[in-house]
Amino acid sequence: MKRILKQVLTVVCSVFIIAYTVMQLSLSRSDAIEVEHAFYSVVNDAVEASAYIFRDEQVVMQSGGGTRSYSVENGEKVHTGEELCVTYRDSADAGVQETINEIDKRIDLLNRSSVGSGSFSTDISRINENINDYMLSIQRSVAEGDLAAAGRAGDELLVQMNRRQAAVADSGDLFGPVISELQQRKASLEASLHGAKVTTTASAPGYFYTAADGYEGTFTAAALDSLTAESFGALIESEPGSGILQNAVGKIASDSKWYIAFTAPRRESAYFEEGSKYSVIFSYSDGAEIPMTYEGISGDSSGDEVVLVFGTNTLRSGFAFTRKQEVKVIKSTLEGLKIRTSALVNVNGETGVYSLSSGRVVFKTAEVLCENGGFYLVKLPNEENRSERSATKLSLHDTVLIGGKNLYAGKVVS
């Protein structure tokens, strides 16, 4: 009998211990909280669109086939009558011409490297300063993704290093023998060119580009004066000039001014002020950010869909002037504190968050500026001093509760 009673008591105690443990675990889970810290963030409020480039361009034509050797760089400024390209019937001749072009560049670089007798050109300390400046310029250009600018700065760096070498050697004609050798090689190569060739020159001054897409006569600056959302759609769907695509050597833009245009809901135009500048990010050019002036709405503006136009004179080296561009036009840049959307609560008609302070839950107000990918950006207590703390408003590095049950101001959290 005692053994049976002992067994019963053991079972009852075990059941009690299990029930108590389950209850405690349940209570523990109900009070479990998740926390994160409010951190500083900057968000660009932008319009994303498929934009098209409009510019005054003149196509450079050259009938007949062959292999082309360009004499000027893409985007280079040219003058009337300047040689743009030589078209060879024999591809081997084109290869020889490319080598000649490279030799010309080396001769020009060495000529600029020669130091004169003046104190300015032989001042080693000044040359060293220039070397440091160009090295910094290269680093900056690479960091910005502007490899063309980095290449130009690299050429100038080489010139300065050559000048330093000549100044240390105290020889103003250190590179003369090398230049003579290159000139002889160039003359020999030119003598080997016997095939038929056609030279194309610039018929007008401007900026030369090696690619033409057949829309140079339609996507013009003048077209923007009367463009509507409907006519813009028709323009996009139009076919390029087939003759242009077959025989174009390139094109010349008459000046540095160019535009982008895209359709957008009318409400988006309210964010932009005509004549003001806005940053435009171009995805096809490694995210190049170019300031552009808002020119206004093109053509008839009575519909719900309008054409927004932005213009600039900025010519970024290496920029891809592809007709269609994926862009982000930054309407405004907002700064504030970033928190998860799940953290926001409404208490007695006020919007804010629960935060931890000295082991207690406190409620702090939070003014939402915008929502971005599951997060809210909320206003800083003091925009002039982001580190300033507030007892009533969400502040930098506050511990924010993003999950939990039975939360209320004053609750003690162990």
Image (tube, rainbow, N blue to C red):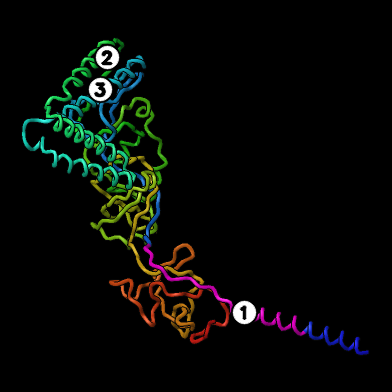
How many discs appear?
A: 3
* Residue 231 in sight: no
Quadrant location of the N terminus in the rendered image: bottom right
Residue 346 image point, x, y percent: 48, 80
Front in this rendered view, residue 262 or 108: 108
Residue 397 image point, x, y percent: 41, 72
Q: Residue furthest right?
A: 1
Marks 1/3: CA distance? 78 Å
Front in this rendered view, residue 61 or 392: 392
Q: Earlier in the sequence, mark 1 or mark 3?
A: 1
In this figure, which residue is indicated by the disc labeled 1?
A: 30
* Region of the chain picked out in magenta, as a range: 16-42
Residue 183 image point, x, y percent: 20, 18
In this figure, which residue is indicated by the disc labeled 3?
A: 103
Q: Neighbour class for label 2 at 10 Å: few (<14), some, many (≥20)?
A: some
In this figure, which residue is indicated by the disc labeled 2?
A: 189
Task: Identify residue type, mark 2.
Answer: Leu
Marks 3/2: CA distance? 10 Å
Q: Earlier in the sequence, mark 1 or mark 2?
A: 1
Residue 243 image point, x, y percent: 36, 27
Specify whether residue 72 is painted magenta.
no
Secondary-structure class at tag 3: helix
Front in this rendered view, residue 396 or 405: 396
Task: Identify residue type, mark 1.
Answer: Ser
Secondary-structure class at tag 2: helix
Q: Neighbour class for label 1 at 10 Å: few (<14), some, many (≥20)?
A: few
Quadrant location of the C terminus in the rendered image: bottom right
Q: Answer yes or no: do the residues labelled 3 and 2 have beta carbons within 8 Å?
A: yes
Residue at 86% x, 87% y is 6
Residue at 19% x, 32% y is 205
**Res. 223 mark:** none
